[in-house]
Amino acid sequence: MKRLRIGIVGGTGYTGVELLRLLARHPQAELAAITSRKEAGTAVSDMFTSLRGHVDLAFSTPEDAPLHTCDIVFFATPHGVAMAQARRLLEAGVRIIDLAADFRLQNLAEFTQWYGMEHACPDLLQEAVYGLPELHRAAIAKARIVANPGCYPTTVQLGFAPLLRTPGLVDASHLVANCASGVSGAGRKAEIGLLFSEASDNFKAYGVKGHRHGPEINEQLRRIAGVAPGSDAVDCLFVPHLTPMIRGMHATLHARLTPAGQALDLQRLFEDFYAQEPFVDVLPAGSTPETRSVRGANTLRLAVHKPRPDTALILVVQDNLTKGASGQAVQNMNVMFGLPEAMGLDGLAVLP
C-alpha cells in the first residue's frame, strides 16, 4: 500500500509536536512538509529534541512547502488559517483535517461572535464533516474536510451521547458539564496566567460567562439528540477549569433522569453503546477514572454513576493533546483513507 504523503501547517505548537510524535511511528505515514514562517530553515529535531532520529524535516514557509503534493494536510494553526488555504488545497486533490475551529460551527453568526472573524468559505463549511469517529465514522470516511473537535467537546459529547441517542431518558434541557484541563490546553504561548508561578498550586474556573466551546458542545449535542440546531430542548451549561498539570482533562457531567431513564441499567447502556469502539473504555461500575490513566494515549475512559435515583453522573478523562486533539486527528485520517482505525495509535498511557 502506498504511504500517505502528509503536510502539517503550523508545527511548532503542542498539537503540532503531538502530531509529529504520532505520525513519526505511523507505518503508512510519510511526513512531506511542516510549516512555520518564524522557524523556516530550522530542523524540527533542533526545536523538539524528543524527535531526534525520527523526524528529519526542517520547517519551511507555507509558500515553499509542497503541500499541494500531499494526500492530506493537517492544520495545527490558530483559528482562521485553514479556511484561508482550504480551497486551493482541495482543488489540488488534497484532503484536510483542521485542528482549529474554522469548520466546527455550522452557525455562521455564532462563529463570528465567538472567533471574531467572518468565515472565508461558507460553502466549504457546509461540506465539512465533524470529526468525532465514534459518532460520524461513515461521513468522515468520505470527507474532503474534517473539523477535528475541540478537546472539551469530545469529553462532553462522548459522555452524554448514550443518554441522548435514545429520546426521553434525561431532561436534556438542563445538562451540566464541569470540566478541567491541563495547562497545555491553552497552547504553547507566553501568557501571565500560564506561567508556572501562576498556574501551579492553583485551580480555577474561567469562561464562566461563556466559552467558545459552549456553542460547539450544544450544536453537536442537539445533533446527537436529533433536535433542531437552535432548539432549547437540548442545552448544556458548560464551565471550564484550569488545573495545574501539563496534559489531561477531566469532565464531570450531570443529567436529570426521567422515569424511563431511572428504570434503565445505565452501566449496560454505556457498555453496549461503546462495545465496538477501540478508544472508548467504559470502566466497571463504581470506578473513578484518573487523568494519568490516559496520559499520552488516544483513549477516553469514562465511568457511570447514579448518586440519586433521578441523577446520572458521568466521569470522563482523556489526554487533551491526544484523544482531545492530535490523536483524534490521526484517528480521523485512518478512517478517511480506509486504514485500520487504531493504526499508529496503539501506544499505552505513560505512568507515573
Image: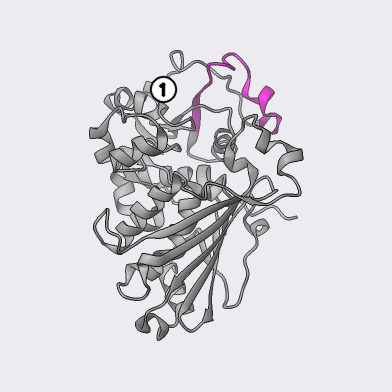
Instruction: Assess whether residue 88 is covered by the magenta stretch.
Output: no
Measured as percent of width and height from the top left, residue 162 is found at 40, 68
The residue type indicated by label 1 comes to: Leu
When the figure is inspected, residue 156 is found, relative to residue 128, above or below; the finding is below
Measured as percent of width and height from the top left, residue 337 is found at 37, 42
Measured as percent of width and height from the top left, residue 113 is found at 36, 37
Residue in view at x 31 percent, y 75 percent: 168
Quadrant in the rendering for residue 20 = top right
Q: Residues within 10 Å of mark 1 (few under 14, many from 20)?
A: many
Quadrant in which the N terminus appears: top left
Q: Helix or strand or loop: what does disc 1 sit on?
A: helix
Instruction: Assess whether residue 42 is covered by the magenta stretch.
Output: yes
When the figure is inspected, residue 253 is found, relative to residue 311, above or below; the finding is above
Residue in view at x 46 percent, y 13 percent: 64
Measured as percent of width and height from the top left, residue 276 is found at 43, 65
- Residue furthest to the bottom in view is 263
Q: Nearer the viewer, residue 208 or 155?
A: 208
Left/right placement of residue 297 relative to residue 157 reads: right
Q: Nearer the viewer, residue 257 or 14?
A: 257
What count of labels does the image hold? 1
Query: Which residue is the site of mark 1?
Result: 67
- The residue range painted magenta reads 30-51
Q: Nearer the viewer, residue 248 or 271?
A: 248
Quadrant in the rendering for residue 260 = bottom left
Residue in view at x 48 percent, y 74 percent: 312
Quadrant in which the C terminus appears: bottom right
- Residue furthest to the front in view is 209
Quadrant in the rendering for residue 261 = bottom left
When the figure is inspected, residue 67 is found, relative to residue 256, above or below; the finding is above
